[in-house]
Image: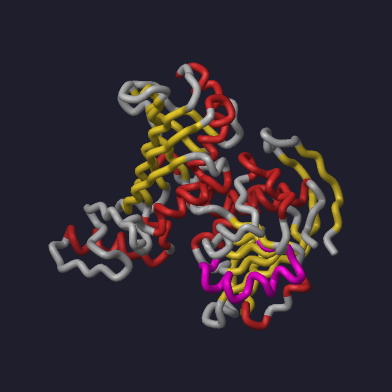
Amino acid sequence: MATLVRETFAIYPSFSISFNITMNIAIVGATGNVGRKILEVLEKKKLVIDNLYLLASSRSAGSKINFNSQEHEVLDLETFDFSKVKITFFAAGGKISENFAEKAAKHSLVIDNSSFYRMDPDVPLIVPQVNSDHLNNIKKNIIANPNCSTAQLVIALKPLHDLFKIKRIVVSTYQSVSGGGKAPMDELIEQTKQVLQNNKVESKNFTKQIAFNVIPHIDVFADDGYTKEELKMTNETKKILDDKIDLTATCVRLPVLVSHSESVNIEFENPFSLEKVRDALENFEGCKVIDDRSDGGYSTPLEAEGRDETFISRIREDKTVKNGLNMWIVSDNLLRGAALNAVEIAETLIKNNFYGK
């Protein structure tokens, strides 16, 4: 069993933690984009891990991944004994979570990055800075990580909702191809080369050419014309923040490798001032305001890549509606929208000495 050696930490909303923990951890999908990012975050945060188990399909089993200057062999997920670990990160997609998460949850606490458990009423959907109190509702030893676009959205909405009470949100997302995994990233690079060489472009991971283009379609269409990605944002925001909030979304894929951007229009129930909005965002853990109202005085996907913060720019009043606000949100989708949030969930659990039932 994991042993708590030493810990000093600050309670939320200030999430600066310094501790030494001996902990047995497994990462399912360790060879993928998010799995590797989880390793980077764990290494950066200097968690002292007693035993680390990297799991993937039989095709990847036997390969080696470096962590903390040591090579770790990737093990076969199918045959792994989860009784060896206390926390298991799942970063391999919904089908893998469906088939293996509950098996892992019999022995360890599961933090799942897929969409499979997000709307399960018995599984808390967590962004620690926003709703860590929902961790009191762990019933299946499984915690869900939200959609990448939802995670960066709610971390900017939370301080504003607390002050002015959000009534309605209209959000358009501009999402990088890394949201679909490594293959779409490789395809964007290859398509770009082919276009520049005047060669024929083939689309394997996208419904249309993505290079030098935008595609207003992410995930499958529902009967009402919305895509699953758009419905995720609506339903997850309600579950995490407040089920009384109305939200409509349009999700667009851009030829950008990393970081998602969002144009957000908010209608509050109560009056606000721009000064109070900026002050609330600047003082909320995980947010960083870049809003100079000058050429280049805003954040873009390039600046957000590799950064933990969620950047907020273009803060201004919407003069067409009462108590309306516009803003621009940018964040690294592989960090805030996946790996970083997952590790911060684990930190919150460790801080409270809770490792599941």
Give the image location of residue 336, x and y in percent.
53, 47
Q: Residue at x 53, y 29 (%)?
A: 165
Specify the segment rendered in magenta. Answer: 91-110
Does the magenta run of residues contain 105?
Answer: yes
Give the image location of residue 28, x and y in percent.
61, 69
Looking at the image, residue 278 sits to the left or right of residue 61; the answer is left
Main SS class of the magenta portion in the image: helix
Give the image location of residue 48, x and y in percent.
75, 55
Does the magenta run of residues contain 290?
Answer: no
The quarter of the picture where residue 290 lies is top left
Q: Residue at x 16, y 68 (%)?
A: 200
Q: Residue at x 23, y 61 (%)?
A: 209
Give the image location of residue 170, x and y in percent.
38, 39
In the rendered image, the quadrant that contains the N terminus is bottom right
User: In this orientation, does residue 300 appear?
Assistant: no
Front residue (pair 325, 96): 325
In the rendered image, the quadrant that contains the C terminus is bottom right
Front residue (pair 22, 175): 175
